[in-house]
Amino acid sequence: FIPPRQASASSPAMGRATPSPCPPCSPAISLGCGASRARTFGESQFQMTKILVVILYAAFVSSASPAEPAPAAGLRSENQEERDKTAAMLRQTFQMPDRKPWDAIAARLTPGMSEAEMREILRPWLQGLHQRMGTMVDEGWNCRLDDVFCLAIRLRRRERTIISAELYEHMMSYGSMPPEGYTGLWRSYYCNGMKQREREIRQGKPHGVSLAYYPDGALHQVMTHADGRPHGSETAYFPSGRLKTRGQYEFGRRVGEWVWYNEDGTTVRSQNAHDDGSGRF
């Protein structure tokens, strides 16, 4: 508290009024000044504490809530050791999600239902809805529900109504491209920690043997590359281990005879690639 200045009588020597010094506060006023200063200091400390708490909380939320789940981020790392370490952890901790809720969703998508009704039911998962190949009269859609389960939906093109909707397993895989100039083995993994693909890389490109696997670890495909392009044989297998496909590449183009098999060993079809170098059948 600062009392107003009091003007004294004009000084004859100076010819003007000179202010008198501020009189000392009374004991009561002095006490009031101290209380005011203490209150102001306390409020300032309180405000600073609030700001500090907000900053610390924001830092905690930022560190505790990454853009994606930590396992997925680890499997997408460009560091092979980090991906291997994350996969090893997932092989110990992964649990299959419950299928029952998705069976209930699939049961609601009945034949004859309109596309609009279908999209309303699938509203929470529309981001995972993608069109796939169809025919002149129908079209196919896939809808990713979680890291394991998907829906396969067929629609009539003209009427825009459901023909069928089936739930199936298709485990999500994660990975990243090798850095430029990388040489060595490069592995990607499924969300359960099992290997999805293992490639030999030279100077950042596939070169050598490339192996693909099913989510349970069974061998799916064996092929070779040269300087980033398929070159040599390609062989694919059913989960049972029986032969599924065999064929040959030359520098990225299919050549010669390609054969596709049923799981019982009978031939589905056999076809020769065109000799014009296009690689088409």
Image (tube, helix red, strand yellow):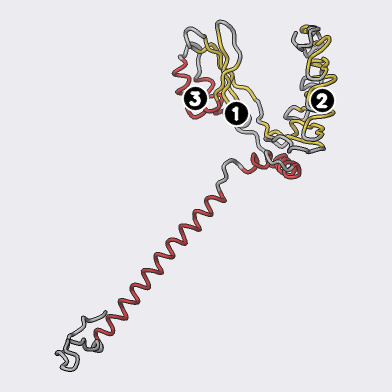
**Residue 225 got which mark?**
2
Looking at the figure, which quarter contains the C terminus? top right
Image marks 1 and 2: residues in contact by CB distance under 8 Å: no
Mark 1 neighbour density, 10 Å: few (under 14) some (14–19) many (20 or more): few
Residue 159 in the image: x percent, y percent? 47, 8
**Residue 87 got which mark?**
none
Q: Give left or right: position of 126 versus 78.
A: left
Residue 100 in the image: x percent, y percent? 57, 28
Q: Which residue is label 1 attached to?
A: 99
Q: Look at the picture and state if 16 lies above or below 141.
A: below
Which residue occupies the extreme bottom position in the image? Answer: 13
- Decide which of 165, 80 is in the foreground and name it: 80
* Residue 201 shows in this picture: yes
Q: Which residue is label 3 attached to?
A: 122
Mark 3 neighbour density, 10 Å: few (under 14) some (14–19) many (20 or more): some
- Decide which of 113, 61 is in the foreground and name it: 61
Q: CA distance from mark 1 to mark 3?
A: 16 Å
Residue 109 in the image: x percent, y percent? 50, 18
Residue at 82% x, 29% y is 207
Residue at 83% x, 21% y is 231
Q: Secondary structure at mark 2?
A: strand
Q: CA distance from mark 1 to mark 2?
A: 38 Å
Q: Mark 2 or mark 3: which is in front? A: 2
Q: Mark 1 or mark 2: which is in front? A: 2
- Decide which of 197, 109 is in the foreground and name it: 197
Q: Look at the picture and state if 68 lies above or below 31.
A: above
Q: Secondary structure at mark 1?
A: loop
Looking at the figure, which quarter contains the N terminus? bottom left
Q: Give left or right: position of 101 versus 54.
A: right
